[in-house]
Image (cartoon, grey):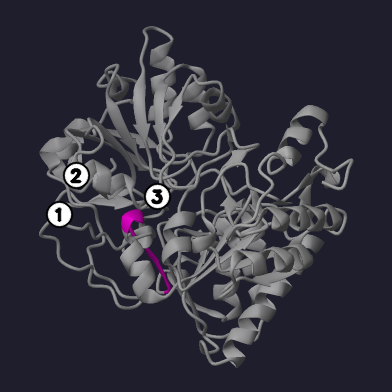
Amino acid sequence: MYQDRIRHPALMEKLMTAQQAAALFRTGMTVGMSGFTRAGDAKALPLALVERSRQEALQLTLVTGASLGNDSDGLMANAGVVARRMPFQSDAALRRKINSGEVMFIDQHLSETAEQLRSGDLHGIDIAVVEAVAITPEGGIVPTMSVGNSASFVQQARQVIVEINLSAPLALEGLHDIYLPAARPHRGAIPMLTPWQRIGSTTIPVDPSRIAAIVITDSPDSPSNALPPDAETDAIARHVIAFLEGEVKAGRMGPELLPLQAGIGTIANAVLHGLVDSPFRNLTMYSEVLQDSALELLDSGQLAMASASSITLSAPMHDKFIRELEHYRQRVILRPQEISNHPEVVRRLGIIALNTALEFDIYGNVNSTHVGGTHMMNGIGGSGDFARNGALSIFVSKAAAKGGKISSVVPMVSHVDHTEHDVDVLVTEWGLADLRGLAPRERAPLIIERCADPEYRPALCAYVEQALLRGGQTPHVLEQALSWHTRYRETGDMRPTTSI
């Protein structure tokens, strides 16, 4: 039984229940769990840890690739299992614990976590929990629908627990390209010149003696919760496509464009969906997550291949991907996230980075993480890796939210994740502002005219007019700069009642 999944005979002795494996954990441990944006996450161990916490206190530092699925983050947070969490999350219950100060959350660029673990800047991984399709005769772990930080966790952990997921088809084997950089300072260059180049192995290597437990599961990944395109996201997509057509016409890139990256979420997914009807052909992706839109582009013929660290799909698209896996496996590669997001590789390949902003200001600074400057939403994720190092950094957002009560274009962002130095293009449903080569004083009127909701434009123009009287390279009226956020906090509506 399970010989097709556990191909190293001696490892059959490591089979145990999730409850038995949960007994290996101790309070204070740092645990690395597989999972990247709801894909390839451990399914049984989080529940077993919650169950164990009902008998005795258990508090862990939890490190992942990105967010977990199956409500695992929230269940563990509510049970008090998670004391510290990094580098990304998207669970509402965990978010409440973070914003109340009950869970210490370390928000990191996704390319940095494995690097900091390797160099000893962070506490080492005590136990790695990795979901797998199978274990090879040599002890290689075959990941499922994500790689994330799993390979780094396995490399560094004292003990490894493998969850063999029977719902993940054996045909996933060979989809992955596992390459980890050597330790500094004598590290060689990452030998990647194209998005479609394979530079590593198809499995995560591990000494079988370090595998402490094997748990059998049979549960699919949580489906994507991205919403379908709407009129506003369709408009954003049209603006982006028109801009890229202009780049081709100007001779700055060919009709195949440069490799594409798109952040997770509804708006970025919708913009990529818009490329299905675009004139571009033979596109490539070098991204962190592949969503439904990536498969649509592969099916339409626009996209030749896609490289990422995770595949996160709606239920129908997941079924289609598994059903037609032989078709997709020749055109999809999954890598460790420190490779998919590596700043030097992103710079070398010349990525077009497309990410979502919570808000941006009149000078091009972007807030991706904090509502009202204080309350964490999800985390910076990989947007910073691509925004600073890509050939083009594009941020998209709907111009207003909450029925117009919140403007996404503000005098000053309440929290800065991406400075004006890392932002090339801003887009809302109203238009697109190309900020390249513009000084702050030139950016402000363009952003207001092209991107702001018309209801907010007069107040933004009035703010700029008063700020210019104060002077400066980046003019501001400091006592008014965050007044819109204050007004929303106090009244529930950001719309000005005065000229400012």
Q: Nearer the viewer, residue 160 or 271?
A: 271
Which percent across, then down, holds residue 225? 63, 47
In this rendering, position of residue 178 left or right of residue 187: right
Callout 1 crowding tier (Cα within 10 Å): few <14, some 14–19, many ≥20: few
Please identify, in this view, whether the residue under mark 3 or under mark 1 is nearer the observer.
Answer: 1
Q: Residue at x 40, y 13 (%)?
A: 53
Q: Position of residue 236 (x, y in %)?
A: 72, 67
Q: Quadrant of residue 128?
A: top left
> Which residue matches tag 1?
184
Disc 2, SS? helix
Nearer-the-camera pick, 143 or 264: 264
Q: Which residue is mark 2?
A: 119
Give the mark nearer the N terminus: 2 vs 1.
Answer: 2
**Outermost residue toward the top in this view:** 55
Q: Which residue is mark 3?
A: 110
Which region of the structure is painted magenta? 331-338
